[in-house]
Image: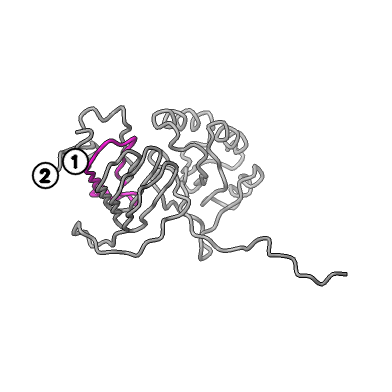
Amino acid sequence: MSSQTLPEAFRLRAGNFNLLVLRLLDPRPEAVLPALGDQFRRAPGFLRFAPIVIGLADLEAAPEEVNFRGLVEGLHKLEIVPIGTSGGSQAMKQAAQSAGLPPLRAVGGVDAEPAAPPPEVAATPPAAVEAAPRPDFSGSGRAAMLVTEPVRSGQRIYAQGADLIVTATVNPGAEIIADGNIHVYGALRGRAVAGAADDATARIFALNFDPELVAIAGFYAVREGLTDAPIGKPTQVRLEGEEMRFAPLG
């Protein structure tokens, strides 16, 4: 028998990911899926193949009233990938698990809670780009993540608990997300989601404003709806109540 050591095939590591949470308010797939599909059509590709957690904490229904299998099948048809559940009673978790949705627990052993923008505004960042916290220039007291390279199509960057400063271009198909403000000192041509932790005071600044989608604290506008925005010019985006406002910089 050979005593030769085989090469290492894999390693297991704990990870820390921010996942989008679909918090169910209605147990019927026929109520949830068309509404979600409508959001999907308004922001094509924004949720495509995104891993999503089903939030059960707000669901006021008996476990037998929830068609989890129908929900899973419908999400797959929308090209959304349900990976598990958070919250809910033990009976509800068991009903979901029988449909292939295991209960997820965050680091520390508590049930996973939503740590990303609501489903209608944002796709899930699989991992944050590592960057050392830097001083914040907005006066909010938050740290800031600095990105100096262009953000490529298909890339997602999430500044958790911080502002995000990008000194290069955000290309079409790229996505940048921040719990605080977003500053783009180049062209913003992808998607920008500020105030991801429900901070309605967050703002988006771009020297060349030409995005696919912008969102602040759950309110968003896609490219076709930016008729009042100064496209291609230095622009500031903010919320006023539930209305998104666009103003020239300088």
Please report the residue visible at 61 percent of the width from the left and 63 percent of the height from the top: 12
Residue 6, horizontal then vertical, whole percent = 74, 66
Tag 2 and tag 1, C-beta contact below 8 Å: yes
Q: Quickly name the residue at label 1.
A: 234
Q: Nearer the viewer, residue 83 or 154?
A: 154
Q: Amino acid at mark 2?
A: Gly
Q: Nearer the viewer, residue 43 or 184?
A: 184
**Identity of the residue furthest to the left in this view:** 250
- The quarter of the rendered structure image containing the C terminus is top left
Task: Estimate the spatial distance between the alpha carbons at disc 2 and disc 1, rounded to whole Å.
Answer: 8 Å
Q: Is residue 232 found left or right of 118 in the rendered image?
A: left
Determine the image quadrant of residue 231.
top left
Residue 72, horizontal then vertical, whole percent = 59, 37
Q: Is residue 130 found left or right of 224 in the rendered image?
A: right
Packing grade of label 2 (10 A; few <14, some 14-19, many >=20) is few
From this view, report whether residue 227 is shown above or below residue 120. above
Residue 186 shown in magenta:
no
Q: Nearer the viewer, residue 39 or 44?
A: 44
From this view, report whether residue 249 is shown above or below residue 141. above
Colour approach in the figure:
one colour
Q: Is residue 123 found left or right of 11 in the rendered image?
A: left
Residue 210 shown in magenta:
yes
The magenta-colored residue range is 194-216
Earlier-in-chain disc, 2 versus 1: 1
Q: Secondary structure at mark 2?
A: loop
Q: Amino acid at mark 1?
A: Pro
Q: Quickly name the residue at label 2.
A: 250
**Identity of the residue furthest to the right in this view:** 1
Residue 156, horizontal then vertical, whole percent = 42, 47
